[in-house]
Every structure is written in C-alpha cells, then in structure tokens.
Image: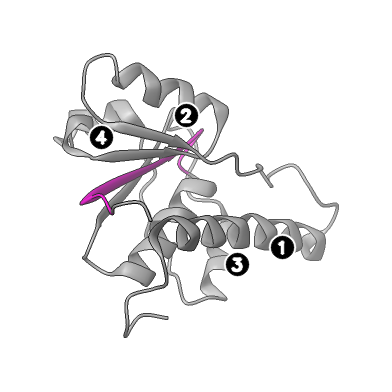
Amino acid sequence: METHPSSVLFACDHNAVRSPMAEGIMKRDYGTTIFVQSAGVHHDMEVDGFSVAVCEEIGVTLSKHMSRSFEEMEEWGDQIDGYDLIIALSPASQRAALEYTRYYALDVEYWPIFDPTNLGRNREEKLAVYRQARDQIQARIRDRFGPPIEGEP
C-alpha cells in the first residue's frame, strides 16, 4: 500500500469539472487528515453546473468552489512546492505538473479521467456522463488512499 502524502493538489485543464470534483470528494472522505486543494492549467471558467449537481447527489458541495489556475495559486500565496503530490487528471495538467518537478521535489501521478463536458445531447445524458466521471474519480481516490475515514461517508 502506498503511503499517504500530507498534502495533495488535484489538477485539470480549467479547475471547473474534474479537479473540483476530486477535491470535494477527497475532503468529504478524508476530512483534514490530508490537506487538499485543486487548480487548473487555465482559469477561464467557473465551476461547472453539472459537476455541482452530480456532486450534490453524493453529499459533496461544489457551489462555493472558486476556480483558479496554478499561476493564481502562487500569486495568492499557495506555493506548489508546499504539496507532496500533484494528481493530474488531464494530459495538459500532467505536462504543467511535470514542469514544476524541474524546480521542486514533489511527486506527480497521472489519472486519465475523461472530460465529460462535450458529451450528451440533453440534460439527462449530460448528467449520466458527469456521474461516470465523478464515479471514476471517487474509485481512483479510494484505490489510492483507502476507504473513507470513519465518520465520513
């Protein structure tokens, strides 16, 4: 079994769909035992409404999530080198995360989570593909970090 880092940064393209879901699920399941945040390569979108909806279904609130980029994180004083592990959920975020390893001693894991944003023709189909992405993220988190902390869902 892998050791647990003390801090994890989830990353995706815009910090609007996959990485906020991962951050919310991780915080719900492990509380404050691991410090968790998320960021995107870009910050040009707010948190996606379908992500908010499918996470509400499992007791994760994303409606107050503030999307941010790696650059904004550092501008706001949240330094990348303060994290033990970056989990990249998209190819672009993996490239960006690996760039940081040139300067900082941190681990990067790549979890290829599909992007549900352009899938589905109507609301129900869109919700179904967002649920698939959410469930894929939740399964990867539990595979990596073990069952939720007792007292958490």
Marks 2 and 4, how far apart in space? Answer: 14 Å
At x 24%, y 40%, the residue is 84
**Tag shown at residue 73:** 4
Mark 3 and mark 1 in contact (Cβ < 8 Å)?
yes
**Which range is magenta?**
4-15
Q: Earlier in the sequence, mark 4 or mark 3?
A: 3
In this picture, is 115 found above or below 104? below
User: Furthest-front residue in view?
Assistant: 1
Mark 2 and mark 3 in contact (Cβ < 8 Å)?
no
Marks 2 and 1, how far apart in space? Answer: 24 Å
Residue tagged 2: 93
Front tag of 3 and 2: 2
Task: Answer left or right for 151 relative to 123.
Answer: left
Q: Secondary structure at mark 2?
A: helix
Q: Secondary structure at mark 1?
A: helix
Specify few, some or many for label 4: CA neighbours under 10 Å numbering under 14, 14-19, or 20 or more.
some
**Tag shown at residue 54:** 3
Disc 1 marks a residue whose amino acid type is Leu
Q: Nearer the viewer, residue 122 or 129?
A: 129
Residue tagged 1: 127
At x 43%, y 69%, the residue is 61
